Amino acid sequence: MIRKFNYTGRKTIPHNRLFFTVYADAAGRLSFKATLDFDTLNFPPGAEVFIEVYRGTSLMRFPCGTVEALELPDREPLPHIQPGGLPLFRVKVVQKGRIFAAADKLIPQTESGERGDHVCMLPVEFVELEQLVWRLDFSGEQPVLQLNAAIAGIREVARTTSPFFALVYPEIFRQILRSILIDGNFSHDESDAGDWQSVWIRFAESLPGGSSLPTSDIWTSVQDKEFWIESSVAAFCRKWRVKERFSSFADKESR
Amino acid sequence: MTTAFPLRMLTDDGIRAFRVYLQGLRQGSRMAPPREMLLSPHQSEEFPIPVAVEQRTFASRIEFCRYMTEVIGKIPYNLIDGDIHLWSWLSLFYFDQVCPVRTDETRRPGMDYRHIPFRDYRYRHRHLMEGAYHVYHLYGDEAALLLCSPLYQENAFHHELAGRQVMIANPAIISVATELYYDVEKERPKTGSGQWSNPGTLRRFIDVVNQLDMTHDLFTMTPRRLMELLPPEFDAWKQGSLSFSVFPTEGRR
């Protein structure tokens, strides 16, 4: 059942036509490269194309020529984007001042040799958190894992140690699914496949032993959603053998 | 005669002590600001570029921004943008203006983010000094609507517009808001323009612009065109405006 209507008349650009790679130099300065493919979408050839890059309240905008004559950024610097994490991207196709087609909340790849279909699902920021070690920040365009910058070695601990993984990541997964399904009332019918919510749901569905998200007419209560979320978290823990990871750490500690 | 001080930055220790002081104020303490930290080698350190800053009194946030532009305007913006240590030091340096003593001799500092910048973008613009300077860096004196309040006060226009990426990054939107709501003669927002209940006021402006943003590319729109698209409820605020000369008509990068 579709509960939203598109009154704007503007078209959606499929996210799989739009690719962005973000580069960071040794000093942390960001730049990006864009690849856009409008073939067979039947957009007006003379319509102007703009890319907007944003993070927090910072935004940079890049005119990219027209649909028939694209001039795409290649390693274009992003000096005015707030530091601390990956920016998101927006593409607008504009005809006579009106938005003919658009795509938003596009997640870039990083240059670290990731596959073309590999997206950063959970950006990490290092911020002041007083006595908190970590938290999930849902205030932006996608969830961000914030780690306490004042803890020496937190980057390595979060990336490589079993106890951190075992204790923190299942809870991150749970909080994100709750945010999507209970706070956000997500359903596949109304979401773009490239939205961060869809990416996380597909991830949950793909876990061994996980199940497809029931269609919205089958959900009857919050309890149903909670059951699916807990099943997904259990599948996550099975896949990464979370108990064994923690047990081996606990074993070493107890000796 | 005013005395110039070398610009410094609070260290992590200094920021922790500043937080403790702010917490004390919230609990009713009447202690004077810990100004010794401003020069303490343990709680503050020199800014890498030698700059002198004076103790002055500012009538408004925009006046503060004008002065800071004289002081740090030539420093590359990325060296000061988001620098928690620098802006915390400045808050302490001008503490009597960002958190003045009240008639009952207490101070009301509000949340920490008003004095110590937070990296979280929801609160980043709320720092009384950095938030103002960032807007001034973008728009200069054309940001008067957002920056005309006293240094200790963030007005509704700054609060609502500076925290919204679509609004603060778009010169046409800031220009139209200024034309509609800023009283140039009195150097303050027009009476009633920030009230929620009146037609065509700030909240409705935000709603309508957000709606237009769904269908129009507002970055390529001139302020005049944007003004024309506003519904009749804004007509009362338009009187005497439509004299756009302040911003370029093209989107900015």
Image (cartoon, rainbow, N blue to C red):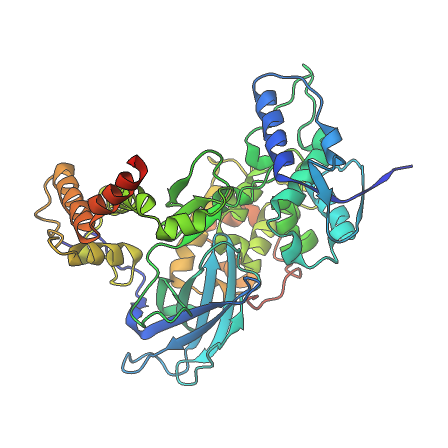
Q: With A145 as the anchor, is B33 left or right in this view? A: right
> Where is residue A195, by image quadrant?
bottom left
Residue at horizontal 54 percent and vertical 67 percent from the top: A25
Answer yes or no: is residue B186 visible: no
Q: In this rendered view, identify the residue nearer to me: B209 or A230.
A: A230
Point out residue B215 in the picture as x, y percentages from the top left corner: 38, 62
Viewer-nearest residue: A125 or B185: A125
Quadrant, the C terminus of chain B:
bottom right
Q: Position of residue A103 (x, y in %)?
A: 35, 66
Q: Residue furthest top?
A: B104
B26 in relation to B81, above or below: above
Q: Vertically, is A134 above or below B212?
A: above
Quadrant of the image containing the N terminus of chain B: top right
Q: Whole-percent x and y of residue A253?
A: 32, 38
B62 to the left or right of A137: right
Residue at point 69% right, 59% down? B76
Image side of residue B157 versus residue A12, left or right: right
Asked if residue A122 lies left or right of residue B105, the reply is left
Q: Is residue B108 visible?
A: yes
- In this view, which residue lies farthest toward the right? B1
